[in-house]
Amino acid sequence: MPDLPEFLEPDVVLFMHDQALKEYGGTHGLRNEDMLHNTLARAENCWHSTEVPALDAAPLAAAYAYGIALNHCFNDANKRTAWNCCILFLRLNGTRVQVSAPDAVEAMVALASGAMAEDAFAAWLRQHFQNQ
């Protein structure tokens, strides 16, 4: 991961949300723009926190997935957008994940329902990092 990660901008997340809706359908619309900005700030705040080791991008990607999935910034497709943004963030920062679609769905549902904690999701992501 680079010294300073490349964080996701709101317009990129909105694009990812639109793409998820185009591919799978759902109700359009942003429920709360301020909530979206606060949600996206979680990853950057995590990066600047002294409590989180900056060993890899997993905790930051998990912050995106957790925040987007649980804060319900959109009318629909929150989990799909959360997953896509998580993977995009990792790719932008030099990490690829290899995981089957059913396993990804299972993990995102667990994260969104509270059955999997954010740090456990980060550990799960790390287990699926591809060797570069």
Image (spheres, helix red, strand yellow):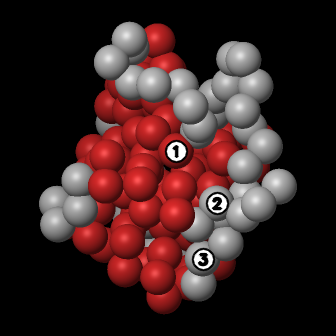
Quadrant of the rendered image containing residue 78: bottom left
- Specify the amino acid type for callout 3: Val
Percent position of residue 75, x then y: 35, 58
Task: Return the disc, 2 or 3, that comes first in the chain's sequence.
Answer: 3
As measured in the structure, the alpha-carbon distance from the residue carrying label 2 to the one carrying label 3 is: 9 Å
Is the C-beta separation of discs 2 and 1 under 8 Å? yes
Dot 2: element: loop
Query: Outermost residue toward the left?
Result: 114
Please name the residue that numbered disc 2 is placed on.
129
- Specify the amino acid type for callout 1: Ala
Q: Residue 58 carries which label?
A: 1
Whether residue 30 appears in this view of the structure is no
Q: Name the residue: 37% across, 80% down.
A: 106
In the displayed structure, does residue 94 sit left or right of residue 80? right
Query: Outermost residue toward the bottom?
Result: 102
Quadrant (top left/top right/bottom left/bottom right) for the N terminus? top right
Task: Return the disc, 2 or 1, that comes first in the chain's sequence.
Answer: 1
Q: Name the residue: 37% across, 71% down.
A: 107
Percent position of residue 26, x then y: 45, 74
Quadrant of the rendered image containing residue 3: top right
Dot 3: element: loop
Please name the residue that numbered disc 3 is placed on.
99
In the displayed structure, does residue 32 sit left or right of residue 47? left
Q: Name the residue: 48% across, 88% down.
A: 102
- Label count reads 3
Of badges 2 and 3, the one in the foreground is 2
- Specify the amino acid type for callout 2: Phe
Percent position of residue 18, x then y: 61, 58
* Callout 1 crowding tier (Cα within 10 Å): few <14, some 14–19, many ≥20: many
Q: Name the residue: 30% across, 48% down.
A: 118
